Image (cartoon, rainbow, N blue to C red):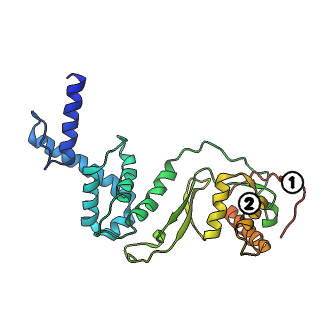
Amino acid sequence: MMPAAFQTYQAAFTAHLRQPVIHAKPAGVDSKRISIYREIVFNNFVASVSTCFPVLLSILGKRRFGKLVRQCFSSQQFKSPLFQDIAGSFVDFLQSLKSPEIPDYTAQLAHYEWIELVLSRQIETKAAALPAALIAEAGALLHCEVELPAVHQLLQYDFAVHQLSRKRRAISPVATYLLVYRDPDFRIRFIQLNAVTFQLLQQLQTHTKTSEAHLQDLAQSLPHLDPESVIRFGLQTLYTLYQQQALRTDGRVATSNQQSF
């Protein structure tokens, strides 16, 4: 086949796979063989999606979930030929979908479940410098430069998606903040945050500073709160995150004027 003719054939073939009722099979293709091929392709698609979204599947049930997968399969323009990238396309599809047949939190729950796959596959381009010794107390962290793990996501949702399950399907909207990160053992871990801690970690995303500098910036942005309290409780929060391997530092002190709380 000439290139143009092949592209035309390919477009007709894939259109039929997606929407066989609307698009007839290309001329010369055996009906039985393409029927089998359609089933194989779609079943692989369903398997790829179902594996990544077990909670959403359990909430919606096989029928409603399967209907969404079929809609995605028929309508999405897939940018990658890899089955492992299908889950991301399903998330994109749900984020653009408006339907009274599914809960309002559907797209956000799907994104929450998908992010674990994203971080597990992400390549870390910047290795953390190893500290000389573990930091034994919160005060010692104050003058160290701190940062989030290289592989992480700060997430903000309108629903507490991490609390959803087959037994808990009905929840009211509530602002929800999460830190998702990959620890040194390559485990994906989730931590729920409050709004102030979320703001503090957003600062860590954009600037590399000492804990003290970050906490002073945070206190200035919250003039209705006592600055000393913000710094004291903020430092303890950072140290707790450090103990959970959600914060890293090379242990170097940026100034000689140390103090402890």
Q: Position of residue 29 (x, y in %)?
A: 11, 36
Specify the farthest residue to the top.
Answer: 2
Q: Say which quarter of the image contains residue 68.
A: bottom left
Helix or strand or loop: what does disc 1 sit on?
loop
Compared across the picture, whether 44 is left or right of 5 comes to right
Q: Residues within 10 Å of mark 2 (few under 14, many from 20)?
A: many
Q: Nearer the viewer, residue 158 or 57?
A: 158
- In-image side of 96 versus 186 (left or right): left
Amino acid at the residue labelled 1: Thr
Residue 152 is situated, as x and y percent measured from the top left of the image, at 57, 54
Q: Which residue is mark 1?
A: 255
Instruction: Name the residue rendered at 61%, 70% in the picture.
Output: 195
Residue 149: numbered disc: none
Residue holding disc 2: 214
- Point 19% across, 38% down: residue: 13
Q: Is residue 204 visible?
A: yes
- 114 or 10, which lies in front? 10
Sequence-first tag of 1 and 2: 2
Residue 145 rendering spot, x and y as whole percentages? 76, 54
Q: Where 101 sits versus 127, above or below?
A: below
Which image quadrant for residue 31?
A: top left
